[in-house]
Image (cartoon, helix red, strand yellow):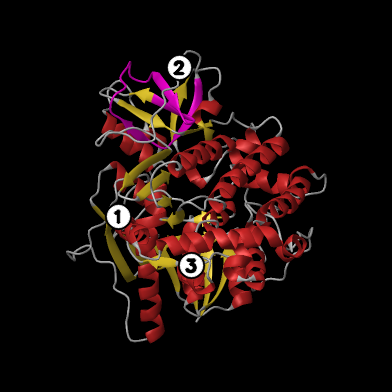
Amino acid sequence: MRILLMASAYNSMTQRVHAELADRGHEVSVELALGDEVMRDGVRRYDPDLVIAPMLTTAIPADIWSARPCFVVHPGPRGDRGPSSLDWAIMEGAARWGVTVLQANAEMDAGDIWASVEFTMPGCAKSDAYRAEVADAAVAAVLLAVTRFAGGRCWPEPLDYARPHVTGRLRPPCRQADRRIDWAADPTEAVLAKLRAADSAPGVLDEIGGTGYYLAGGHPEDELRGQPGAILARRDGAICRATSDGAVWIPQLRRRPAPGGPGTFKVPATLALPRELGGVPEVLAPLTLPPGRRTYRQISYHECGAVGYLEFAFPGGAMSTAQCRRLLAAYQHAQARPVKVIVLGGPRGFFANGIHLNVIEAAGDPAAESWRNINAIDDLVHAILTNTSQLTVAALAGNAAAGGVMLAAAADRVWCRSGAVLNPHYRLMGLHGSEYWTYTLPRRVGASEAARLTGACLPVTPASALRCGLVDHVIADDAAGFRAQVAALAQQLARGADYPALLTAKARRLAADEKQRPLAAYRAAELAAMSRNFAGPHEPYARLRRAFVYKEKPAHTPAHLARHRPAPQGPRLSRPADLLAVAG
């Protein structure tokens, strides 16, 4: 079927729907909703059989939905309406929620229902739920709706609040007044609900030291106590603030822009508050905590039998220089332990997205910070590649992109949840990329497929990644089920009779590869290109990074997404195949 995706942004939901539909043989193009005329022109040019809106913050023009079928993906159960569906669900503690695919009409979210899929709310931040449970339900509902539409034998169900299975209702937008935290009165759980419902946008507007900030993210703390609202401690870039009956950790802040002033962007909370943290202690947490403790850690480690689990969860999946160095130290700790297998990856959420563009943009010298950051992540990848005493498993519970995909590719095994979205490319940020990808990616998928993956700049489903060799195993389960299956598979790997042979083969292959071309040569070639990207006067990296960090609205739908539009003229980015040729 010929399908046009209409979306306000090419976000994780749009990417997942795009990749899943393309995997099933549909001809898919994308049009960003940059205005009514743009949407109309996209429909005229592409002439789709069906328009699907995976994430749309504006109404589809009436002359489009009245002329051809338009499906809207709404993150709420049957009958739920309004722009803040998930926000209210989290703030009100909903146990069950859903995603509904409905046909666009004159009334927002009130069209006939083609499919609806429910799920259990996971009790986490909105962004984590959106990329996992919500996205899983959305894809299931979209595929069901498309199948019903294509079959021509099923008709949508009109919205009727008299029916018992229609459990939703019209809800107003969730405003900052609804999110406001009363630090003196609100208990910890209420504060957490407000913080989690606003993550990662729009954040909770609050005041610290007389300045307005949007708070992003919230995690409980079960030991520290203090005057409500006071900053009690700092750790891994986060700050801990006292509530009326406990405390919460807040990882990121965004300063409120001045009226008419320049935009702002999220950074680690301690980076946003250099003057307000005088005298605030840094309270470190060990890699391994006693059972039952509730506190914030970006990196943790625990063992079960011969398997060590090195878990990490960095906000937005970005890895700053400091985070890369801490993760490397934790990996070296695991190396020194008597375990046979190291499982690398968080329990849910992003696996990793590579270098931390926001921290880089905030640096006094972004080019220098880019250089420090890429070298820090390269050091981590090198440690994984050269570990011949243990096997490393990259367990991708969630999405990964750019250097995060290449970090995973360095592992001996890559196991991926079926609901993840992979973006194995760098070009859209004007980068050649490093993380030893010119060594690991061709070794996994072949040189031609490596060039295609890094050059197409399109999302890849785990099923497609499995077919080409980018991942080794796909696990179809929710986040909790994924963890359980990873644990079982890791124990099998550690106990397997072929474990010694696997280690021997790994060491021999590494030695042979080093003899043919040392790892240092791959790194040097990659970093030489990255150095030009970071500091070259005519390189697009700084401009593209700034647009990403400040969330600038694009002028047009990128040509690699809008297959119905001619590619605009502009500066040419170097092709990944060029670097592969240099790396040899």
- Residue 337 in magenta? no
What is the CA distance from the residue labelled 3 to the residue labelled 1?
20 Å
Looking at the image, residue 242 lies above or below residue 22: above
Quadrant occupied by the C terminus: bottom right
Mark 2 or mark 3, which has the lower sequence index?
A: 2
Residue 279 bears which disc, if any? none
Q: Which residue has dot 2 on it?
A: 280
Crowd around label 3: few <14 · some 14–19 · many ≥20 (10 Å): many
Earlier in the chain: of badge 1 and badge 2, it is 2
Q: Is residue 496 above or below residue 234?
A: below
CA–CA distance between discs 1 and 2?
Answer: 36 Å
Residue 385 spot, x, y in % from top left: 56, 53
Residue 401 quadrant: bottom right
Most foreground residue, 457 or 29: 457
Amino acid on which the number 1 mark rests in the picture: Ala
Magenta region, residue range: 211-240
Q: Amino acid at mark 2?
A: Val
Residue denoted by label 3: 461
